[in-house]
Image (cartoon, coloured by chain):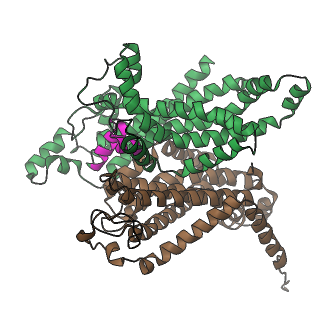
Amino acid sequence: MIRYVIRRLLLLVPMLLGLSVIVFAIARLLPGDPAALAAGPNATPEVLASVQREFGLDKPIPLQYWDYLTGLVQGDWGVSIFTRRPVFEDIVTFLPATLELVAAAMLIAIVLGIPLGLAAAVWRNGVLDYVTRTVSLGGIAMPRFFLGLLLQLCFVTWLDILPLSGRFPLIDLPPEEITGFYTIDSLLTGDWYALRVSLAHLALPALAMSLSPLATIIRMMRASTIEVLQQDYIMTERALGLSSRLILFKYVLKNAMTSTLTVIGLYVSWLLGGTVLVETVFDWPGLGLYATQAILSQDFMPVIGVTLVIAIIYLLSMLIVDLLYGVFNPKVRSS
Amino acid sequence: MTMIQTSLPKRDPSARLENWSRAFYRFRQSWLSVIGLAIVAVLIVIALVAPLIVPYPEHVAGATDTAARFMPPSAEHWFGTNALGQDMFSLVLVGSQVSLFSGLAVVIIAIAVGGLVGAVAGYFGGWVDETLMRLTDLLLTIPSLILAMAVAAALGTGILNMIIAISITWWPAYARLIRGEVLVKKEEQFITAARALGAGPGRILGRHILPNIISPVVVKASLDMGFAILTVASLGFVGIGVRAPVPEWGTLLSTARGYMPDYWWTALFPGFAIFLAVLAFNLLGDGLRDVLDPKARR
């Protein structure tokens, strides 16, 4: 098992190397001159040249890549032309907010989706089945940014029980930074006021993001539970007189989880890449807003950095899913 | 030497008709698919005739009517008016053009590029396959929305640039799908037969393999149309999309966001249009899958 993990981790290295080449190539092949943008519209050629030298843009492209790669390994991910701060520091600042949002959304989707999918399969064609099927059809088609706006309209304008946007009130001090997750930090420090406020801010964006994974998880869970229920070994267990509850929770759930796990793993990265939209609606200070800002100002280094971070998290989450397969399905473990 | 006339066995036209009617019967079995098909048909008709039937065509071209700003929905303005006094009903209807056209273009380009890469990789195998598929895998790990945003922003606004940007992130999924199908099909007897008759790789791929793997591609394409429309609207929403006067659902929604609680109608109707279009293509795709790929039926 440990050897398998190490081998998989080593395989990540060439993938990341290839990824950095592709992302760098795309960033460099695109039209648009970041130096000209940074220097401003009235820059003289001398100013332009000095800006280009400052960011190393005057060197040949393969050399620029080499500089970038060696920097990458040392934690120097370049400097954002606009914030004038190191990209790595920026990412460290913004990443926890995005991760907290994605984790909360996935938590909602998993905690609701797995029991609902299971129940829909057990009481097939019942009322609950029709309700969840309708919700999941609509949930996949619903644009997250539109859902976010509707939630704001409902919970902020009409009911007036939740804050409109942001992560924490600007006038208050956020909880002491330990993990960077405001909810966990305020729990750790026992700051109940901060916990309440950060949960209130987190609720709507997390809800807006959770609908489409929730819909998919319900669908997957329902389909795979129905499939498992029709297997011969389930009939054998029924014939042996095991209680329905034991069969459902011990045997069916475990077997139905495998295909649902893949979806969960895929969704983590999909959500990370897609936070852009929800973060825009709720002014959530995460990677998505940072990337949007950088993209709109053609600031390459942050875009490359954010892309790489999300790709790394994607690869790692796929690795975790593969390892979890082994937990749920011993057949995978041996191969 | 005498020429021997041989004629290829013709397919009985009545058999083909029967296949179609059977497929249509299976499709009709699910009323959700029929609803999907109906909405898609209506959307296509709207997109084709919108500029001719909308009540205020001049607003679509960019004209404003500041005297009639923020009028709530009424008999005169079904969807109300926006900050510039433009009729939202006209804008939303014409907005279907950009969404449907660019969605379709993205899917077609993705199938063409992905199909070529996947077919070549699957058919030739070996290092060609390895190289192409590693590249595809790498591209699949890149967050597609951010990549599309970056490319679209760098190329500048405009429908064509947006289509190129989204297509770059879409073809790898088709390459994977088509490679898998080609791998299975190329081991079939009739391919060996075609090769024995002296057919080259181009002919085998084009005439014998591709027509046989069209079903899963069509199913994926119709499901993807919905998500392509969603991506187009997303780019519009973050402010990287079509140029200003051209109405587009995502851009309309993004503008409306600023006037949100008070003038809710400016956001509600474009948002609902996106939802309806995506839903319709998803339902249609599900129905097509049941017809074309009965094994995947749940």
Horizontal side of A239 relative to B212 (left or right) equals right
User: Residue at coordinates 37% horizontally, 51% vertically from top-left?
Assistant: B149
Nearer to me, B49 or B2: B49
Q: Residue furthest right?
A: A239
Q: Is residue A290 magenta?
A: yes
From where the camera sits, is residue A214 visible?
A: yes
| Residue at the spot 27% in from the left edge and 44% down from the top edge | A299
Closer-to-camera residue (B83/B92): B83
Asked whether residue B288 is in view, the answer is no
Q: Give coordinates of residue A41: x percent, y percent.
A: 13, 54
Q: Which residue: 48% across, 78% down?
A: B49
Chain B in the picture: what colour?
brown
Q: Is residue B263 above or below residue B10?
A: above
Give percent across and percent down for residue B152. Answer: 36, 55
SS majority, magenta: helix
Q: In this view, does A186 lie to the left or right of B177?
A: left
Q: Where's the N terminus of chain B, which quadrant?
A: bottom right
Q: Is residue B220 above or below residue A185?
A: below
Query: Chain A's colour?
Result: green
Q: Where residue A168 sits: x, y (%)? A: 31, 30
Residue A232 drawn above or below residue B118: above
Q: Is residue A50 magenta?
A: no
Which residue is at the front of the view, A263 or B282? Answer: B282
Q: How many callouts does the rendering have?
A: 0
Point out residue B256 in the picture as x, y percentages from the top left corner. Answer: 34, 56
Magenta highlight range: A277-296
